[in-house]
Amino acid sequence: GGFGTDSPDNTIHGKYDDSTVYSTDTHTAGIQIENENSTANTFSQLHFRSGNSDSYIRNIRNADNLATLVFLTDNGGASGDVGEALRLNNDQSATFASSVTANGNLTNLHGNGNNIKMSAGAQITASAYSIYTAETSYLRFVSLNNSIYHRAKISHVFSNEDGSSDLLTLNSSTGAATFSSSVSATNGIFNNK
């Protein structure tokens, strides 16, 4: 049937005219699915079904004015069992349950310290790949509580744990390496070839 239209294009068709431009503010136009229960981790959901295969989008209540959005898909398990594919957390981070395939670029639209995190054992595999950052951006490599920063422009610069001091500069044009302090070898000999 139609909502706001006498000639629906689909089984359910809602139609309205609203000139409000996009922003992150809440808005009253559209469809609302509401669960009035305020218990933590209760949810409202949109359920999709084709034959006996199901997918869900669930809005999970974390606390007052805090929510997590999850996407679940049928994963071939028992009837009534689905797996979480994607979780959009209330801090605006995203968690994928498995591998992520990008046929184009992965882009950080905000560039404000947001991270791409890989857990232990995770890897990026490709015949060739590039990582692009803005001039003032950096890559941060973290292992347990230790980290090192990498910036690339004309030179590749590796910085200390908090990014405040450059440790090594590799000049992309000349190949020269500049260390900010003395260089030592724990085992063996440091060779200049």
Image (tube, helix red, strand yellow):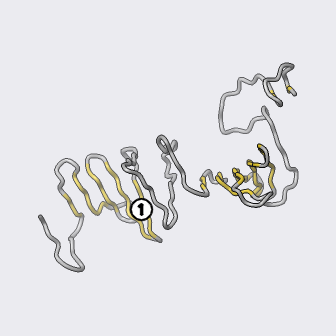
Residue 110 appears at what percent x and percent y?
A: 52, 44
Question: Which image quarter is the C terminus in?
Answer: bottom left
Q: Please give the name of the residue rendered at 87% of the width and 19% of the height, measured from the top-left corner.
A: 6
Amino acid type, residue under disc 1 in the picture: Phe
Residue 165 appears at what percent x and percent y?
A: 33, 61
Q: Please give the name of the residue rendered at 76% of the width and 22% of the height, measured from the top-left corner.
A: 17
Quarter of the rendering containing residue 76: bottom right
Residue 75 appears at what percent x and percent y?
A: 69, 56
In the image shown, does 94 or 96 lie closer to the viewer?
96
Q: Residues within 10 Å of mark 1 (few under 14, many from 20)?
A: few
Quarter of the rendering containing residue 182: bottom left
Question: Which image quarter is the N terminus in?
Answer: top right
Q: Please give the name of the residue rendered at 69% of the width and 50% of the height, measured from the top-left corner.
A: 71
The residue wearing badge 1 is 141
Q: Is residue 114 above or below residue 26?
A: below
Residue 47 located left or right of residue 150: right
Q: Please give the name of the residue rendered at 86% of the width and 26% of the height, measured from the top-left corner.
A: 2
Residue 4 appears at what percent x and percent y?
A: 85, 23
Which residue is the extreme one toward the left? Answer: 193
Residue 176 located left or right of residue 23: left
In the image shown, does 116 or 130 lie closer to the viewer?
130
Q: Is residue 56 above or below residue 186?
A: above
Tag 1, which secondary structure? strand
